Image: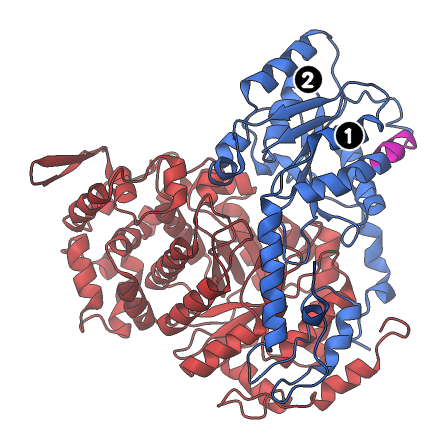
Amino acid sequence: MSQNYQYTLGKHRYQFKNLGDLMAKATPARSGDRLAGVIALSAEHRAAAQMALADLPLKTFLNQTIIPYETDEITRLILDEHDEQAFSTISHLTVGDFRNWLLSDKATSEVLKQICLGVTPEMAAAVSKIMRNQDLILVAKKCHVTTAFRNTIGLPNHLSTRLQPNHPTDDVNGIAASILDGLLYGSGDAVIGINPATDSVAQAVKLMKLMDEVIQTYQIPTQSCVLTHVTNTLEAIELGAPVDLVFQSIGGTEATNTSFGFNLNTLAEAQEAALSLNRGTVGNNVMYFETGQGSSLSANAHHGLDQQTCETRAYAVARKFSPLLVNTVVGFIGPEYLFDGKEITRAGLEDHFCGKLLGLPMGCDVCYTNHAEADQNDMDNLLTLLGVAGCSFVMGIPGSDDIMLNYQTTSFHDALYARRVLGLKAAPEFEKWLMDMAIFRDIDQVILPDDIPNVFKHALKSLPKGRV
Amino acid sequence: MKSKTLSTPPTTSDEAVENPWRILRAFTDARIGLGRTGVSLPTHEMLAFQLAHAQAKDAVHLPLDVQSLSIQLSSLQSQPKLFTLHSQADDRLTYLQRPDLGKRLNEISRLGLMQDSEAHDFQYDLAIVVVDGLSSKAVQQNTPKFIGTLFKDIRNTPSLTNIRIAPLCIVEQGRVAIGDEIGELLNAQLVIILIGERPGLSSPDSLGLYLTWQPKVGLNDAYRNCISNIRPAGLAFKDASQKALYLIQESRRLKLSGVNLKDRSHEKTIEHEEENKNFLIE
């Protein structure tokens, strides 16, 4: 099943030891692939690999595995659930032809939806490697993926936000302060999602109750999530906690997920438990997944593959459980995987494209850490590009500064910038709420009022004495 | 130095709109209530952010003062011995790009620990490894006080009073996993790693704690428990020490660490609903 590949350029014959190696060598340069020792050895080497990859029939990915079927449950998932019928439209194409087809006028939003289950992660990864940034944007924009729980995410010309009110000690008033700040800037339609400072069941339950009370008190058509381990959320459900969405970080190899402490059965069990609560009002997508290039290498579980191919395989895991949201946390992992703004930008566009092509509600945590070669200008660029590409949601955090996770992501202000320059809207149910609450003076023009809406004036009046 | 004109909001501006809920900053260091011009950041907030980012970037590259830390840490333990170790990453640039090298000891460090463990035949109950990580500032400022608190709490816990603690270790250019190699070489049943977390804009001094039962080279994150954000303005030393104490006891009792060892040290708080009320809910 292992086959050599080669490509001759002039007098030089480039050899690739197997399909995974060919994919790795064809990948646009990034530090994580250098760290893994799988990167192309020269620019020409990469170009040759891209040409060899372009000549490869898409069917190859159904006949050859890059991680053995016997030893990896994600490979089994990908092949066992492949939809031959959906694949038939594109089954005659090479990777290079597939790029042409995706960009062609034939590939309308409807047609792309029809072939979705015929595309494997490896096919998506392969074609993305021979696409320029504008190609990734153009095709992703055509892929419409809509999901729902208490509102509808992913409609064309909409951009939702996760309100991320993290606090380094999970202080309830500190979290409430960030929630209020976000709501008053129109943030939080994708989810109000907290990364807890301490990963315990008791803490998770406390935060779930906090958000549930806020959502119920103000009748906000949105959902909450505590980003704790899936087994914690399962315990919380057993304890009767108000769980809207189940969270889990996922990777594209079984060994990665083992290092994260779960497998596909765990996710199935959690999805079933969350569905049994029946808390959605307009839909029942109950899962929230996060991914990011480099997680498999970081867990020493990448099987000699490049990080973008591993990342795309994680989308097969996500797709199995019909998530409300999938978030690629693109710049969080650090410079050893994505070195600078250029690499982060490319990865963000690849992940968004591959996820959308595979039918996922892709959002992106447009972010960087303080040890990466990136800054706010890089974030502005990627946010704008993703907004153009039809990204489902981005993060919203006070002033771009996550004081718990110690990294910078997009702010409440940033999301409004994107909505204003690109004419994008919040989820319709949430937008109606924003209007009812008078949070905007003119929501179509994205103009905020000068005064605090009455309903929240009341909350500010009830502040604990002596604290402010 | 932080300039006062940048850190305080302006009193008047023709275009910028202030957010009255800025008073909620009493509850959080998050950058809430920044105000706006249109939907964009006012100039002074934009520049204040740029300054904080510049300072955080500088913090990543500040080297750990091993000599002064050694003196401080030595005074906390009964034995004079303390190991100063180095990873295989020779410098910061290598460290940033090669996490694999930061996870392993260099040859001299490894041999030093091996010689020591050959000199005795007993097993340590606990080893504590101090690693610079991505913020030497966090380690320099917080580890002496935290370890002092933890040692005191261990002495006051009947089941732990007599445990055998290995000489403290200080590691330069290290990652979390290097603690597993050190714990294995020292022949320790349990290892605690204290490491500088990557500096945030508002928290360049955040310390992380990782715990592994029966540490050995090659274990992954599923085998570790973590306590994050240990610093005066974050998780206070006494609280972090109590959490660590809980994990140590549970790990010894269950003979494991990682995802199967849940932190239930705050289980009691569930029932005290009143303490969990916030100002958004009456």
Output the letter for the chain in red: A
Q: Chain of mark 2?
A: B
- A44 is higher (above) or lower (below) than A166: above
Name which quarter of the figure residue A274 lies in.
Answer: bottom right
Q: Position of residue A377 (x, y in %)?
A: 46, 65
- Residue at the spot 7% in from the left edge and 36% down from the top edge: A11
- The residue closer to the viewer here, A254 or B175, is B175
Q: Chain of mark 1?
A: B
Q: Nearer the viewer, mark 1 or mark 2?
A: 2
Quadrant containing the N terminus of chain B is bottom right
| Comes first in the chain, label 1 or label 2 | 2
Q: Amino acid at mark 1?
A: Arg
Q: Position of residue A231 (x, y in %)?
A: 62, 48
Mark 1, secondary structure of its residue:
helix
**Between marks 1 and 2, how big is the CA–CA gap?**
19 Å
Farthest residue, direction left: A10
Residue extent of the magenta highlight: B150-157
Q: Position of residue A45 (x, y in %)?
A: 21, 41
Name which quarter of the figure residue A142 lies in.
Answer: bottom left
**Residue B248 visible, this orientation:** yes
Cβ atoms under marks 1 and 2 closer than 8 Å: no
Residue ID for mark 2? B187
Whether residue B30 appears in magenta in the rendering, the answer is no
Instruction: Specify the colour of chain B.
Output: blue
- A441 is higher (above) or lower (below) than A64: below
Q: Which mark is residue B253?
A: 1
Q: Amino acid at mark 2?
A: Asn
Bin the neighbour count of mark 1 within 10 Å (Cα to Cα): few under 14, some 14-19, many 20 and up. Answer: few
> Are labels 1 and 2 assigned to the same chain?
yes
